[in-house]
Amino acid sequence: MKTFFSTPFASLLLAATLLAATSCSINVNNQNDNLMKQRINTEKAPAAIGPYSQAIDSGTGLIFVSGQLPIDPATGAFPEGGVQAQTHQSLTNAKAILEAAGLSLANVVKTTVFLADMADFAAMNEIYAEFFTEPFPARSAVAVKTLPKNALVEIECIAAK
């Protein structure tokens, strides 16, 4: 019985895979030899409330901004006004972090919006649209059971230099 693995195509595929694997070098040690990862931090956004950074410059042209809760860095509290006020604050925080990296919201290529209740999507979207212009970043929006500190929204983003 002839199987796929005994065909000439499979032999050619295996040879090509082995050739590609031997011509590549993969650094799997954890010494960050070639990774120029840098922390981005600003006092114009709330400090991280755990073992993470406000953002990371990956050294590859991408900036990864951690999920921003709607905490006003001046007061340490959520703004009053429901999901719209909270969306505004979360995006203001993300904007401040990007500015600390020398970027703006125009550099954002992807966002993820976490909502405590998907019924708040339209209200969040109304404020979100005020912060971004065409071409809008790619976006995912998901409802989650609970957000830290019982926030109504949290927004993370990826920006390109």
Image (cartoon, rainbow, N blue to C red):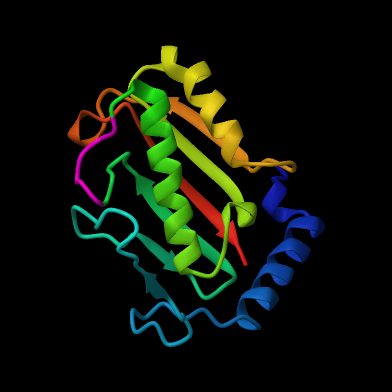
The correct choice, above or below, for 106 with respect to 155 in the image is: below
Give the quarter of the figure containing the N terminus. top right
Kindly give the residue lying farthest to the top in the view shown: 119
Which span of residues is magenta-colored? Answer: 74-79
Q: Is residue 150 magenta?
A: no
Within the image, what quadrant is residue 90 found in?
top left
Where residue 36 appears, as percent x and y from the top left, is 46, 81
Q: Nearer the viewer, residue 83 or 26?
A: 83
The correct choice, above or below, for 7 with respect to 34 in the image is: above
At a point 22% along the width and 36% down the height, the residue shown is 148
Where residue 72 appears, as percent x and y from the top left, is 28, 45
Is residue 135 shown left or right of residue 33? right
Within the image, what quadrant is residue 47 found in?
bottom left
At a point 41% along the width and 77% down the height, the residue shown is 28
Magenta region, main secondary structure = loop
Kindly give the residue lying farthest to the right in the view shown: 8
